[in-house]
Amino acid sequence: MSETEQRVIFIFPGQGSQYPGIGSDLCAEFETARRVYEQASDVLGYDMAKLSGENPDERIHLTRYTQPVLLTHHIACLSVYRELADTPLQPAAAAGHSLGEYSALVTAGALSFEDALRLVARRGELMGTHGEGEMAALTIDLEGARPLADKHYCGIAGLNLPDQTVVGGAPADLDALAAEMAELHPKKKAIRLKTEGAFHTYYMVSAARHFREALNQVEFAEPRIRVLSNYTGGFHESAAESIRSRLFFQLFHPVNWIGCLQSALDDGMNLFVEFGGGIGIGSGDGPAEKRPNLEGMIKKFARRASPRPGYIPAINSATIRAAAGAE
């Protein structure tokens, strides 16, 4: 694929892709990364590198810390990539899953890194404080999930894939939903997620109402590249008030990741580059052992696309170095 044919989209994962030690490899190797972490520390008033690398008191998994930890890691990965690459890929668009949407807006120049840090720190604080309930990922489509969710007073929280729908609700309601789902769809699963609340459902309305004040205090610029909205599944309009309102509604409406991926493909995006985060079953695994969070969803969703889009991870020192030489 020649450079003139490439339409690149930069993507950023959300909560669930944090882990103790995240960013420690970047800070050890790259002055550029250390500057990003120092900048985050100055804005937030605590040592971001220490929090991310050492995870004192298990704080990295508390939503109020998780979100700025991930935003910082996203931007550090992106900054190191741009420094290392002789000819960095130039994205035509950016997208992020839930919290990752803020990193996409930073990438597009719609938000400064500093303002994005303040927003996600406040967002995480409110989601943890005002949020209730839990979440579960159902391996069924929206058509099958919605009647179950409605019956058991749960909300649709995310459309990750055509056969993966996330729901949120009170623990007892999720238990009842899972029990009925096992009867109706014995080959399907309801996988409980570790969160501090039923994010992206009606349980977050109170948090969103408080968060609106924070959104109103931040300046949004016109994006230099197009950014996908989790709320609509389409591209953001360029007006600041429109971006604000969609970030407000994003808090208590489903993450329409299916819509975002389809919009990217419909717009001709043929190379996805994922920055930051990491997943893996070993809790003690370091950055080198982690896998990208969004890769599986992207490849599964796009497997029938013709031509099939390319994918590049840039989530730790090794993959960033590889991505920087991949042009």
Image: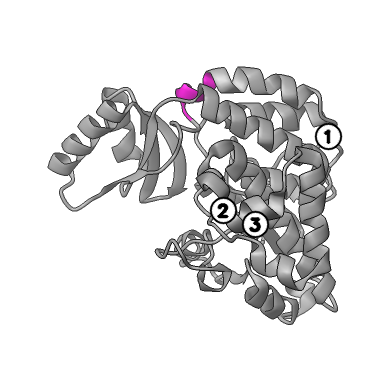
Choose between 143 and 154: the one closer to the eye. 154
Residue with the mark numbered 1 = 220
Q: Main secondary structure of the magenta part?
A: helix
Where the N terminus falls, by quadrant? bottom right
Question: Taking the image as drawn, is residue 153 in sight?
Answer: yes
Residue at image x 61%, y 41%? 65
Element type where label 3 sits in the image: strand
Q: Amino acid at mark 1?
A: Phe
Which region is colored magenta? Answer: 201-205
Instruction: Looking at the image, tell me whether mark 2 or mark 1 is earlier in sequence order.
Output: 1
Q: Residue furthest front?
A: 57
Q: Quadrant of residue 169?
A: top left
Choose between 121 and 296: the one closer to the eye. 121
**Residue 246 among those drawn in magenta:** no
Q: Position of residue 292 (x, y in %)?
A: 54, 65
Q: Residue furthest left?
A: 183
Q: Are marks 2 and 1 in contact (CB under 8 Å)?
A: no
Where the C terminus falls, by quadrant? bottom right
Residue with the mark numbered 3 = 11
Q: Is residue 64 above or below residue 72?
A: above
Q: Quadrant of residue 229?
A: top right
Q: Position of residue 38 (x, y in %)?
A: 80, 52
Residue at image x 28%, y 32%? 174
Image side of residue 13 versus residue 154, left or right: right
